[in-house]
Amino acid sequence: MTNALSLYLDALRFGAAFTVFVSHYANERYSGGLFWQSMPYGHTAVLVFFVLSGFVIAWVTETRERTAEEYALSRVARLYSVILPAFIVTALLDQIAMAIDPRLYGPEVLPQMSHGPLNVLLGYVLSSVFLGDSWILAMPPGSNLPFGTLNCEAWYYIFFAVAVFMQGRRRIAALTAAALLAGPKILLLFPVWLMGVSAWRWRVALPGQQGAPLAFGAVGAVIGLEAFGGQQLFQDAQLPWLPGSYSAYDYIVGALVALFIMGLANAPLPIPGTLVERLIRLLAGTTFGLYLLHFPLLNFFGTVIPGPPDSAMHRLLVFGLTLGAAIALAHVIERQKGAVKRALRSGLYIMRRKRPGSVLGFWAGPLRRMFPRQR
């Protein structure tokens, strides 16, 4: 991946995260409906995330993470270095805000929060192993409703790893077990993620001179689709075992985003100035944290800031404080990935060296088979 392509994908990634934030901020509770036009595009931005994720994962497995061990360590470090701090922030903010005004966390806003502390705790436990949206479950960690997308993302990492690093009957058995655990809500959007993988694999088949026309054509197609109604053109199935707002729209947008990325990968991309590039890299480095932190922060500031939601001061403070706090926290949290990965690698090394009779040593054999060293 060229530096120019990486920069443009970083801009697209942060743009998608910012769109999700604005689509949630547009809710009556937080802003009195300001920017209400953006609300449908939060779902579209999530589809962009899925395609981008598939593209990047396909790239890293071909260039950096060529072993199951390296892939697993990177993915676990990437996920848990952010979600564990996000759990802590969400729990603290929820407790403070509910003590101030529990009505704003009632069943009409956050149904899962009104079923008692044990239900809330179960949401955190299931989310920690990415089962909060398995089958008909809908149990996010506290008020952090966007976490459902991360449940999908984690399982897509697992499906891809099994398909790439395992073979034969083990691969079939592992894929079957993973699919049964994940359930249809997660599986139905997996093709959108795979469109990103396909974009990486097929990018070389596109002649260079066709890159820019393809990228512009994909953007034009998305604009045209939205001009004619976007998601409203498709029937929105509302069943507990289907993803939220699920329809054929998801696959159409996923395919157009994949084509757009393929076009970018084969187009002559102008590089902006150094300051702009640094800003894009800085903001892109907060994308994961911004996505996971913005909703509990919105709930918190929407509760503690006085005044009606449609007042100018309330709107400004909720928007500015939420976005600023999310980016600041994300900047700190996401820098811990390297330290978490080193700690995991050290732990795995210790487990491998333990005697077979010890508790840790019991797992050494299976770990060696799952993550063989490749020379």
Image (cartoon, rainbow, N blue to C red):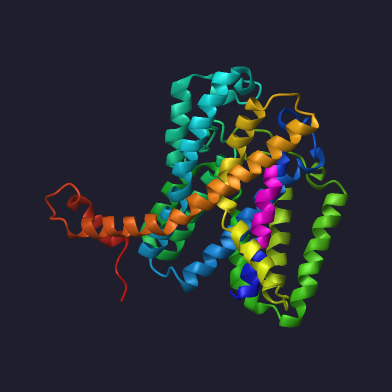
Rendering coords of residue 99 (x, y %):
54, 19
Residue 75 versus residue 109 in the image, above or below: below
**Residue at image location 65% in from the left, 71% down from the top:** 5
What percent of the width, then of the height, locates residue 114?
55, 19
Position of the N terminus, as image quadrant, is bottom right
User: At 44% from the left edge and 29% from the top edge, which residue is drawn?
Assistant: 122
Q: Nearer the viewer, residue 136 or 353?
A: 353
Q: For the C terminus, which image quadrant?
A: bottom left
In terms of secondary structure, what is the magenta stretch mainly?
helix
- Residue at image location 53% in from the left, 38% down from the top: 133
Examine the structure image and report whether residue 14 is included in the region drawn in magenta. yes
Q: Is residue 20 magenta?
A: yes
Q: Quadrant of residue 196?
A: bottom right
Residue 152 horizontal/vertical position (percent)? 54, 47
Tally the marks. 0
Q: Is residue 354 left or right of residue 123?
A: left
Q: Is residue 241 visible?
A: no
- Relative side of 157 to 166, left or right: right
Residue 319, x across and y down, in percent: 70, 39
**In this picture, which residue range is highlighted in magenta?**
11-21
Q: Is residue 342 above or below residue 186?
A: below
Q: Nearer the viewer, residue 25 or 163?
A: 25
Q: Is residue 1 above or below residue 111?
A: below
- Image quadrant where residue 74 sits: bottom left
Residue 269 visible in the current orientation: yes
